[in-house]
Image (spheres, helix red, strand yellow):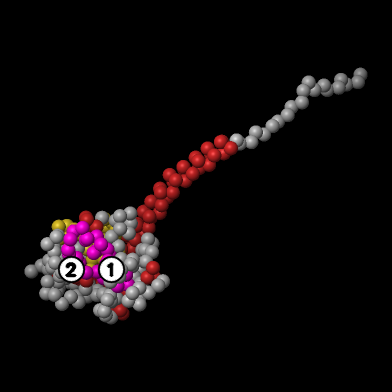
Amino acid sequence: MAPCPLVLSGTATSTRRAFTLIELLVVISIIALLIGILLPVLGSARETARMAKCLSNMRQMGISSVAYAGDYDDTLPTVGFSHGGETFPEQGAWFFLLQDYAGGTLHYRCPSDDSPAWDVPDGTGRLRRVGYATSFLHSGLTSSPTYQGLNVLHRVPRTSATVYIAELAEESPTGFATSDHFHPETWFGDPSTHDATIGLQLEIRQHAERANYTFLDGHAENAARSDIFEVDPAATLFNPLFVTNRVWADVAR
């Protein structure tokens, strides 16, 4: 008996529907919205990571500073890079001296430091060699009796509340971008100009409107400028007065 032929009652067909223009625009808009939401988050996370790396580096600088002082009768290292017309012996610069105490692991540049002076000499004709600065009050080079002795740790009554290292200004018409120290004793004037005055020497908004600071006891903090130092309106040149003072402490008498 011959097999019955297979009879198909219909033909199955498949069709692929293309996106309409409106659907495509909606998808593109959603993707753009997601990118707009995620980019700031990713940028913030990236800056947080940079801040943490810089803070760790500055903490190591603080620990190395204390170790150095322990070997030199409690005396801190001095500065080495000039600004303006001043000159100092670069071979004695604090950053290079501390490298030996950190096993050569100190980084001279914060991951967020975009100073053009790394590649192009500033107005003084020098390149930037370190992105961090110590307070000149602790250099041992000041001629003012008010600040003499502040380079010896046991003469500073509140080492845990006294800033020693900060992040150096990336650009400065006064030469601080290629220096390695800052001058708190020159901060004075109208309170509305304090950010600009201090900003000639320090990068006070390096990390999301904040910056990193190392203290004389070796610890480091990330803080807003106003939580570290707030200059008193009565301050004058070489007579620093502070409302909030974590940058200068009287010598113990």
Instruction: Give the CA distance from mark 1 to mark 2.
Output: 15 Å
Closest to the observer, 23 or 202: 23
Which amino acid type is marked by label 2?
Glu
Reply yes or no: does residue 186 show up in magenta. yes
Q: Which residues are magenta?
A: 175-202
Give the mark toward the camera: 1 or 2. Answer: 2
Residue nearest the observer in this picture, 248 or 95:
248
- Residue 215 in the image: state x and y as whole percent: 23, 63
Quadrant of the image for the N terminus?
top right
Identity of the amino acid at label 1? Ala
Q: Which residue is mark 2?
A: 185
Helix, strand, or loop for circle 1? strand
Q: Is residue 77 left or right of residue 125?
A: left
Residue extending farthest to the top is 1
Residue 227: image quadrant is bottom left
Q: Is residue 136 left or right of residue 114?
A: left
Q: Is residue 63 left or right of residue 118?
A: left
Residue behind mark 1: 133
The answer to whether residue 187 is seen in the rendering is yes
Tell me the residue at 33%/56% (across/down). Answer: 207
Residue 232: x and y in percent read: 14, 60
Residue 64 in view in this figure: no
Residue at (78, 21) in percent of width and height: 9
Q: Residue at x 91, y 20 (%)?
A: 2
